[in-house]
Image (cartoon, rainbow, N blue to C red):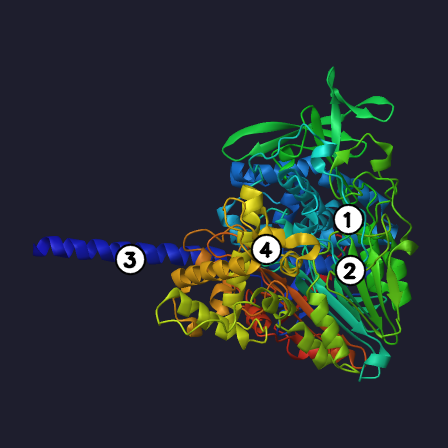
Amino acid sequence: MALVFRWLVRLASALILFGVAVFALAYYFASRSLPEYEGTLQVAGISAPVEIVRDNANVPHIFGETDEDVFFALGMAHAQDRLWQMTMLRRTAQGRLSELFGARTLPIDSLIRRLDLYKLSRTSVQALDGQTQAALEAYSDGVNAWIGQVNAGARGRGAPEMWLFNHAIAPWQPADSVSIIKLMALQLSNHLETEVLRARTSLVLGNDERLNDILPEAPGAGLAALPNYAALFPDVPAFTPNNRMAFYPLSPVVPRDLAGASNAWAAGITRSATGSTLLANDPHLGLTAPSIWYLARLELESGGVIGGTIPGVPVIMVGRSADLGWGITSSNLDDQDVYIEEVNPSDANQYRVPNGWANFESRESIVRIKDEPSITLQLQWTVNGPVLPPDQFDLGTIRPPGHVTVLAWTALSGQDTTMQAAMNLMRARSVEAGIAAAENYVAPSQMLTLADRNSVGLKLIGHVPNRRADNVTQGRMPHYGYLPQNRWDGHRPFDTNPGWIDPVGGIVGNTNNKITNAPFPAHVSFSWSDSQRVNRWRLLMQAREVHTRDSFIEAQRDTVSYTARSILPLIGADLWFTGEAAPGGTPEKLRQDALALLAEWNGEMNEHLPEPLIYAAWMRALQDRLMRDELGPLAREYTHVEPLFIERVYRNTDGAAAWCDVLQSAPRETCSDIARLALDDALVWISQNYGTNLQTLRWGDAHEATHDHPVLGTAPVLRWFVNIRQSTSGGDNTLMRGRTSGIGDDPFMNVHAATYRGVYDFADPDSSVFITSTGQSGHFLSRYYDDLGELWRRGEYIPMSLDPALARGGAVGVTILEPVLQGN
C-alpha cells in the first residue's frame, strides 16, 4: 500500500511539474510577441527619422517630417499592438475566415463574398485623390515593416493568437484599410433586417392597424400607411421557420437592435461658461477585448490631431485638432432596400427588368475551409445589387416562389471616397471646412457633430438614396425590383442633407433620434434607434444656462432612465397601494415589496440598486406577454423592450390596448391584469436566478459588461485570461448606454456601450479628456490590455493633450524609426 501511495505521489508530482512546464513554455512563447516600446529601428519607407512617444497610457504620439512618414509610423504602432485584430478584420472583409476556423464561419464568408466588399474596396482605392492614396501606401508600408520585424526578430509571430491559428500574414495593402470601413458600415446598418422583420410581422398579424404599434414610427408628423405585405405578395407563406444565420463573434452582422447608436453634442459660445465651445462624443459599439478603438496622436503638416483610430485605418475617426473637434453618431439613414427580383421561368440566368429580361452578372468564388473540401459559390448581381440566399437575414421567410432577394446599399460602391473625406476632415480647421470635407463621405452614414473655437454644427453625412415619391413601400418593406418607381436614382445632393450651424439655442446634438419631419422621400428614415435618450439629453442641456467640460462629462455618465420614469406610472397605475398587506413569504407579498421599491425609485440605473433589475425584468416579461399571443414564435425576434409600443398599449393609442387581451382565453384580460401577471413572471425569474430578498439585489450582477475576445472568449482556461467582465450601471435607454443582450439565460448582460468617450474644451484644449473601454494593447499579457477598462467602468478619463512635453514627461517608451540608408 505504501508503495502504491509513493507512486501516486510521484505521478501527481510529475503531472504538476509537466503542467507547470507547459504553462511556462506557453507563457514564454506568448510573451515573445510583446512589443518593446523603447529603441531604435532601421526601416525602409520613410524619408527622415520618426519619433513614436508612448505616454503613460500607451497612447502613441507620432512626430515626423512628412505626413507620409507619420502614417507609416501609425501603421507600425497599430501592428505592434493590434496585429491579430487587424488581420481578423481583413480576413472578415475578404470572406476568408473559414480558412482558419472551418465551417462555423462559412455563413460569414458566404455573405461577404456575395456582397463583394473586397473587390469594391480595391476599385475604390483608385477613386481616391493622390494625397489619400499616398497616405494609404505609407500606412501599409508601416504595417509591413513591423511584420518584417516580427519575421526577422523572432517576435513570437506578432501576436499570441497566431501560435494557435498559424497562418502566413500577407502584406498589408491600401484596399485592406478601405475594406475595414465597409465592414464597419455593415456592422452599423440594420434597415435590411428591419424591412424583413416588418414584412414578417405584417404576414403574421394580418391586421396592419396593429403593425404600427409593434414597429412604431418615432413621434412626429404622421406618414402614409403601409400596404399589407400579404397583399403585395399573396403567395408568401404566413410563417416559416427562422433561418437566421447563426451569430458568431467575428461576424460583422449584429442583431438588429445592436446595429449602431452613440451620443454627441456641442455647445456654442453663448451656452458655454468657458468663453469657447465644448463637444462631447461617445460612439456605441459592441463590447470586445480589445476594443475596436485605438487612441493615437498624429503630428501632421497641417497640425496635431488626437483621438480614436480603428486599427487598420490611418485616420483619426473621432477626436480633435487644436482648432476643431468632431464626433460621430449613427444617423439611422435608410440606406438599404430589399428587392424581390423575378427569375425568368424559362431561363434561370435572367431576371425581370422594366422592359423584359436581363442576364444576372455572375461569377464563381471559391471558399477554402479548414479540414474540409473547398466550396464554390455562384455570385449573382442585378442592376439593383447582389443576390442574397434565403438562409441569410431570414430572407426565405418573405420571398415568394420563383424570385430571389437582392440588396441595394450605398456602401456597395466601387467609387467609395469615404476614406478621402475622413482624411480631409482631420485637416479641416473650422466647422464649415469640416462639413465641406465630409461631402465625399459615402458610408456608413453618420451624424457629424463639429465644434471649432467659435462655432458648432451638426450635419448628416453619407450618400442618401434618391427614391421616387411613388415608391410602393417607401423603402420600409421589400418590393419588386423591376418596377421603375421602386429603384434608386443615384443619391441626393449633399447640400440637401439635414444640417445646422450655430442654431439659435446654441446647442446641437444627436442621440440617434429623429432629426427631421420632412415627408418622404426627404424623410431620411422611418426607423430611429432612439426615442428615449433624447428626452433625458434635452432635459440636461436645458437645465443649465451655460455648460462646462464637467457638465458635459456628467451628461455622458448619466444613468437615469427617462423610459422608466415615464412608463412605470402608466403600467402600475392600478397596482400600487391596493389591497391589504399580504402575508410574508407569499407571491403577493413579493409583488407588494417590488412595487414599494419601484414607487420610491427615481429611475437611476445604478449598478448597486435592486430597482433597475426589477424594472428591467418586469418590462421584458410584460412585452413578451403582450406580443407572444399574437405573434407566436416570431415574438422571439423582438429581443428588446420597445418603449413606444408599451406606451401605445397602456395609453390605448388607436386601440392598441387590444394587445392586452389574450386571444386564446375566454375572459377579456385588461392591461392591468397583464401588468400584474408580468410582474409575477419577473419576480419568479428573479427568485430563481438571484434570490427572493429584493433589497439585496444588484443591477450590476445582471448587467455585467462583456468585453469578450472574439476568438478565444469561449476557449477553456484561456477565456479567464482574455475576457474582461465588469459590473456596470446604465441600461438600454440611458445616456450612459449599456445595451443588454436581450437573449439567452443572461438577457441583461451589457454587450453594447460607449467604447470611446471624449470631451473637448476649446477654451483650454489640452484639458480635454478621452477614454476607451479596454486598453491600447491587444496582447492579453500586456499591462495595457485592460488598464483603461476600470477607468471606463467608473466613468473616468485620461488627458487628451497635444502638448509634446506632457507626452514625453510620462513616456513608457520612445521608439525612433530611422530610414535605411541607400546601399544598406
Label 3 element class: helix
Query: What x and y, as percent, mark residue 464?
Result: 84, 49
Q: Is residue 273 above or below residue 778?
A: below
Sequence-wise, the earlier of marks 3 and 1 is 3
| Residue type at the position of mark 2 | Asp
Give the residue number, with chain letter if any, for mark 4.
640
Give x and y (percent) for residue 677.
48, 58
In terms of depth relative to the viewer, which is nearer, 494 or 437?
494
Residue at horizontal 18 percent and vertical 57 percent from the top: 9
- Reading the chain from its start, which is encountered first: label 4 or label 2? 2
Mark toward the start of the polypeptide (3 vs 4): 3
Dot placed on the residue nearer the N-terminal end, 3 or 2: 3
The answer to whether the residues at label 3 and label 2 have Cβ atoms under 8 Å apart is: no
| Label 1 SS | loop
Task: Characterize the local packing of mark 2: few (<14), some (14-19) or many (20 or more) Cα atoms within 10 angstroms.
Answer: many
- Mark 3 vs mark 4, foreground winner is 4
Which residue position holds label 1? 334
Seen as rendered, the residue at the extreme left is 1
Q: Amino acid at mark 3?
A: Ile
Query: CA gap, disc 3 to disc 4?
Result: 48 Å
Residue 488 shown left or right of residue 293 in the figure: right
Q: Nearer the viewer, residue 806 or 385?
A: 385
Instruction: Please name the amino acid that badge 1 sits on.
Output: Asp
Question: Label 1: few (<14), some or many (≥20) within 10 Å?
Answer: many
Residue at image mark 2: 69
